C-alpha cells in the first residue's frame, strides 16, 4: 500500500478556473504512480467568495472556507481519516520510499493532525525520518491529514474563528494555516505531528491568495512566467 491508498479519501482543493493547476496536479499524481479515480482521490471545488469579511484577503477567506468544506464533507461521509492537499502540490522524489515508512509509523500512533509537507528543510538532513511533535507554527496547509475522530473538534474551532471579529484575542478571521496553528497551540489535547522529511512542496504557480504582480497581470508576461515556473518545478523535482 502506498501512502495515498492508506487514507479513506484524498481531496485536492482547486478553483475551477485554475485548469492549469488541475492538469499539473493530475500529472504529478501519475508521475508518482498514484491512481487518480475521482472518488477515493478527487478534487474539491474551492469556495470563491466575493468579499473578505475580515480575512487578510478574499483569497484567504476562500482558502479557509474550502478547507472547512472538505472537513464537513469528511464528517458527512463518516470517514476514518482524510488526506488534504492544495492544487499546487509537488511530491518529494522520495515519497515512495519515505511515504510507506510514514504511514507504517502512523499506524501505531495516536494522532489528530499530521503534516506530510512543511517548511522545515533542516529536518530532511536527519538520516532516519520520523514523526515529531509540532512545537512551532507550520505556515503551510498544502499537504496534511486529519483523523476522523478529530474532524468535529477542528470543524467547531473553525466556526468559532469565523464568528469572532478581526483582532479577537482568541483568534478572529485568519489564514487557514494560522488557524491550525492556533488550535494546536491553544489545545494541548490535540496531537499534531510532522514527518521530518517533507514529502510534498508547493509547486511554483501563480497565486490565488494575494494580489497579482505585474508579471502575472500582463498577458505576455504571464505566459513567460508560466513557462519559467514549469522549468523551475522540473528542476526542483530532481533535487528534493
Image (cartoon, helix red, strand yellow):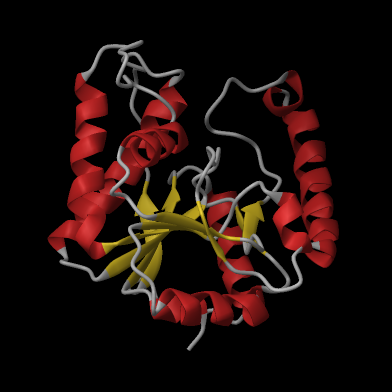
> Picture quarter containing residue 183?
top left
Picture layout, residue 18 above or below residue 32 = above
Q: How many marks?
A: 0
> Picture quarter containing residue 174?
top left
Query: Would residue 163 be visible to someone looking at this image?
Result: yes
Whole-percent x, y for residue 6 in the image: 41, 79
Whole-percent x, y for residue 201 in the image: 65, 54
Q: Residue furthest front?
A: 188
Residue drawn where x is 38% and y is 72% of the image = 109
Residue drawn where x is 43% and y is 37% of the image = 181
Picture layout, residue 195 above or below residue 172 = below
Picture layout, residue 50 above or below residue 48 = above
Picture layout, residue 72 above or below residue 25 = above
Question: Which is more toward the observer, 99 or 229?
Answer: 99
Residue drawn where x is 66% and y is 75% of the image = 31
Residue drawn where x is 76% and y is 25% of the image = 215
Q: In the picture provided, is 179 more to the left or to the right than 121? A: left
Q: Residue furthest bottom?
A: 1
> Picture quarter containing residue 5?
bottom left
Q: In the picture provided, is 3 more to the left or to the right than 213? A: left
In the rendered image, the quadrant that contains the C terminus is bottom right
Whole-percent x, y for residue 32 in the image: 64, 77
Q: In the picture provided, is 117 more to the left or to the right than 222? A: left
Question: Which is more toward the observer, 145 or 170?
Answer: 170
Query: Would residue 35 be visible to someone looking at this image?
Result: no
Whole-percent x, y for residue 186 in the image: 33, 34
Amino acid at each position: 500500500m502506498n501512502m495515498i491508498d492508506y487514507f479513506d479519501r484524498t481531496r485536492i482543493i482547486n478553483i475551477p478556473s485554475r485548469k492549469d493547476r488541475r492538469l499539473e496536479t493530475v500529472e504529478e499524481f501519475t508521475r508518482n504512480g498514484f491512481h487518480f479515480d475521482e472518488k477515493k482521490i478527487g478534487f474539491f471545488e474551492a469556495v470563491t467568495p466575493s468579499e473578505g469579511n475580515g480575512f487578510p484577503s478574499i483569497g484567504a477567506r476562500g482558502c479557509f472556507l474550502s478547507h472547512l468544506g472538505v472537513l464537513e464533507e469528511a464528517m458527512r461521509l463518516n470517514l476514518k481519516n482524510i488526506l488534504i492537499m492544495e492544487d499546487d502540490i509537488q511530491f518529494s522524489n522520495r515519497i515512495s520510499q519515505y511515504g510507506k515508512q510514514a504511514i507504517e509509523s502512523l499506524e501505531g500512533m495516536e494522532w489528530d493532525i499530521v503534516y506530510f509537507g512543511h517548511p522545515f528543510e533542516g529536518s530532511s538532513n536527519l538520516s532516519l525520518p520520523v514523526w515529531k511533535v509540532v512545537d512551532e507554527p507550520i505556515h503551510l496547509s498544502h499537504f496534511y491529514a486529519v483523523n476522523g475522530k478529530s474532524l468535529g473538534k477542528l470543524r467547531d474551532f473553525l466556526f468559532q474563528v469565523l464568528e469572532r471579529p478581526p483582532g479577537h484575542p482568541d483568534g478572529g478571521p485568519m489564514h487557514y494555516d494560522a488557524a491550525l496553528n492556533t488550535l494546536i497551540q491553544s489545545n494541548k489535547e490535540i496531537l499534531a505531528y510532522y514527518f521530518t522529511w517533507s514529502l510534498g512542496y508547493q509547486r511554483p504557480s501563480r497565486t490565488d491568495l494575494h494580489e497579482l504582480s505585474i508579471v502575472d497581470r500582463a498577458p505576455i508576461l504571464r505566459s513567460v512566467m508560466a513557462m519559467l515556473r514549469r522549468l523551475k518545478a522540473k528542476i526542483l523535482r530532481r533535487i528534493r
